[in-house]
Amino acid sequence: MVAVASPRGGLWSAAKGSGLVRLCIGLGTIALVLFVALFAPLIAPQPPDLIDFMSIASPPSTEHLLGTDEAGRDILSRIFYGARVSVAVVFVSVFTAMLFGVSLGLVSGYRGGWVDDIIMRVIDIVISFPTLVLALLIIALLGPGLQNAIVAISIVYIPYFARLTRGEVLSLKSRDYVSAALSTGTPHRVILFKEILPNLLGNIVVYASLAASEALITESALSFLGLGVQPPTPSWGYMIAAGMQYSSYWWISLFPGLAIFVTVIGFNFLGDTLRDAFDPTLARRTRSSGSGKEG
Amino acid sequence: MATIEIGDLSVALPAGADRTHAVRDIELSIGPGEMCCIVGESGSGKSVTAQAVMGLLPPALRIESGSILYAGKDLCREDAASVRAVRGSGIGMIFQDPMTALNPLMTVEAQIDEILGIHTALDRKARRARVAAAVEEVYLEPERFLPLYPHQLSGGQRQRVMIAIALVLQPKLLIADEPTTALDVTTQAQILHLMAELQRRHGTAVMFVTHDFGVVAEIADSVHVMRHGEVVESGEAAEVLREPRHDYTRMLLDAVPSGDLVERDGEPPASAPLVEVRDVSKVYIKKRLFGSERTQALDAVSFDVHVGEVLGIVGESGSGKSTVARCIARLLEADSGRVRLDGHDFLALEGETLRRERRAIQTVFQDPFSALNPRRTVGRSIAQGLINYGESKGRALATARTMLERVGLDPTAADRYPNEFSGGQRQRICIARALVLEPRVLIADEAVSALDVSVQAQVLALLRDLRDQMSLTIIFITHDLRVAAELCDRLIVMREGKVVESGAIADILLNPEAEYTRSLIDAVPGRRWESFGARAHR
C-alpha cells in the first residue's frame, strides 16, 4: 500500500528502521485522532454550532485558524467534534464486523461441509456488491442516521473478516498441533478457542486496522450523501459536501478532507507495520532476498 | 593446482546473533576430479561456506576476511561483473529443492537453452544439440523430457535436470548444497551414482554439502567436518571415517544409525494382537475443474501389532505409510477396512465415545515445529490431554512436569513457550505430551526424520528407554532403514499403498524377499562402509 522501504534497498536493518518510522507515524496519528475525539469540548476553540454572524465563510485567520463555513461556524472546532463521529463509527463498526465475521469464519472453516457451503455462498453474494452500494441499500431500508450508518458499515465488512478467518482456520486446522489436540481427546470447543483462535488473531488485528481506514472512507461517503449522521452534528463527510456548493470558499471542504486523508494514512501505516510484524514469511523473504539461481 | 582454494575465510554474522561468525578461518582446497564433502549438523556453517563461494550469501552476511581463489582470481576481491562471468561459466550449482530452483513457467529445454544463450555464442541449431546432449547425459530421453515443465517431473527427474543445467557449460567446479536431502532413498542412490559418474567423466571438482555421513562414505574423496562455523577435522574420507581424530567427528559417526541389529526376538508373541489392521483402503480425491483425480493412498493394507513390540513401517514418499498411521489414529477416515484395538472396532467409534477412546492411541509427528501450539506454554500443551480426561488443572500440570523430567527436560520447561526450544527438545515435549496419557499404542510418524543425527540418536535412545520402562507398544514410521534397524522388532515395507513385505527385522534386512525391499536396502547410503546389518550374524 505505502511502500516506504524499497524492496531492493538491500539492508534488512534499514527496512526495519523505516518500519519503526511507519509505526510511529501510524500510532501517532491514530492517538492524535483519539485524543481530539475524546477531548473535543476542552480543546475546541468554540462550540461546533456557534454561529459567528460577523464572519460567514471567512478564510483562515488568526481568529478562525481554519476559517469558518457558510453558516459562520468555526471549521477547526467542527473538525474536532467531527472526529468523535468518525472514531465512533469506525471503532464500533469494525469491532462489530470483526466479532460476527470471525465467528462465522471459525464455524465455516472448522465445521466444513454443508454449513461451510451455505455460509460461504451467502458471503459470496454479499461481497459481490460494491461496499458503498451495499451500504446505501441497507440505509435505504433502515433510514439515515448515525446508528444505521454503523449497522450498515458493520454488515458491509463482515464478509471480509469471515473470508479471511475461514482461510486461516483451514490452514491452521491441518497443523500437527491441532491433530495432536484432537488425538489427546480435546473437545472441539477447546480446539477452536485455545488452539486455533489465538493463532489467527494477529492477522485479524492487522486486517482490522486496514478495514478501519476503509470504514472511515465509507462513513465519510455516507455523510457526504447526507445518509450518515444528521446535521447539525458535525461530520467530516458532511462538511465536505456542504463546502462543495461554495467552490470559491475552498477551505470549507479542504480541511475536513485533509482530516480524512491523514486519518486514513495513519490507519494504513499502522496496518502495514502490524502486518510486517506478524508475517514471518515477509521477514524471511527480505532476509534471503538475492539467493536466486545464477548460471 | 587446485581448482578452488579457500583461505582463512571468515563470514561475519550481524550483531545480536548467537555467535559472531557464521564461519571462521575456513581453509579448504579442491583439486580437479576431487569430490569434497562438507559435513555438519544444522547451524554448522556448511551451507554458508558454499554460499560464499557461489556469491549467494544472504544480504545480512558479509565476508570479513580471507580469499576464495578460482582460476587465479580472488572471488572476494574482483568486481561484480567479472565475478559473475567466472561463476556463470566456471561454477555450476545444484540446490536442495529442485522445484524452487527451476522456473515453473519454462520447459526443460528453455531452461537449459537460456544458459547457453547467455554464456555461449552458439547458434540455435548448435544449442539444440547441446541441450539434447546435456539431458541425455543425465539419462533422460530428450524427445520425452525436453518439452516438459518442472511440475510434470518427479523429484529425481527434476534433480537430474538441475544437474544437466549445472553441467551444461562444463564447469570446472560444481557446488551441490544438500542435493539429495529432499529425495527418497532409492532416488538419492541414483542421483549420487550419477553425480559420481559425471564427475569422473569430466574431471569436475565437486563441493558437496551434506549432513549425512552415509552419503560421505558413499561418494567422498575428502571430507571437512564443520561445527559452530569452524572446520574441526579434515582429511581423506576413508581415513576420517575409519579413524576420526576429533571428538565431535567421533560423536557424529557414533550417532549415525548404522543399521546394526540389536539382538532381539523378532517373532510376534503368541498372544492376540493389540492392534489388528485389516484391508484398510483410502482414496484421495482431488477436485479438478473437470472431473476429479483419484489417488489410491492405501490399498487393502493389513497387519498386526502385538503388545510391547516396536513395529516399523518403512516406505518412500507416497507409499501410504503416514496415511495408514493417520487412519489408525482416526485423524483421517479410512474408506473401508477394519482397525481393531484389543478386539474392539476402533473405526466404528463416533462422537463422545471416540473422544474418550482416543486416549489409547497417541501420535508423535514429524515436524517438531508445527506440532506444538506456539501460543501455549509447553506445560499447558502437555497437561491439556489429562484435563480432557477429567484431571484437575493443578494435578495435570504437576504430572506434566514429572513427564518432562522423564523425557530428559527440566521441569521448569513447563512454563516456557515452544519457540524457546530446539527441534530435539520439542520432539521430547511431543513425546511427553503423547505419553502423559499412558496410551496403549504410540505412533511415531517420522518422529526423528527432521532432526540432526546426534539429536536423532538421543531421541531414539529415549524411545528405546521408554519402551523398556513402560513396555510401550510403538508403531514406528520412517523412510530410513538405518533408523528402523535401530529400534524395531518387526518391519513392514510399503510401496504405493500396499504392503510388499513384512516380517522380523533381521529376516527382512538380511534376506529380503521382495525386489523392492532389496532395492531399498541397496540404496541405503554408506552401507558398504559399515557393512549394514552385518553384525546380526555374529
Image (cartoon, helix red, strand yellow):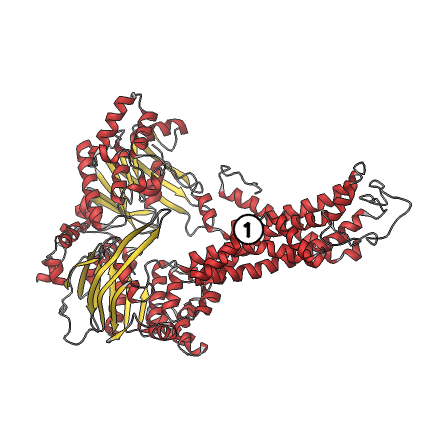
Q: Secondary structure at mark 1?
A: helix
Read off the residue under disc 1: A127
For residue B291, above or below residue B34: below
| Side (left or right) of A191 relative to B432 | right
Q: Position of residue A136 (x, y in %)?
A: 66, 51
Residue at the farthest right position: A54
| Side (left or right) of B457 relative to A76 | left
Please tell me which residue lies in front, B324 or B178: B324
| Side (left or right) of B508 relative to B166 | left
Q: Position of residue B414 (x, y in %)?
A: 42, 69
The image quadrant of residue B57 is top left
Question: The C terminus of chain A appears in which quarter of the rendering?
Answer: top left
Instruction: Let me know if residue A276 appears in the view.
Output: yes
Mark 1 belongs to chain: A
Measuring 37% from the left and 41% from the top, which residue is drawn there? B10
Q: Position of residue A268 (x, y in %)?
A: 60, 47
Measuring 45% from the left and 46% from the top, which residue is drawn there? B14
Residue at the farthest left position: B538
Measuring 32% from the left and 75% from the top, which residue is drawn there? B438
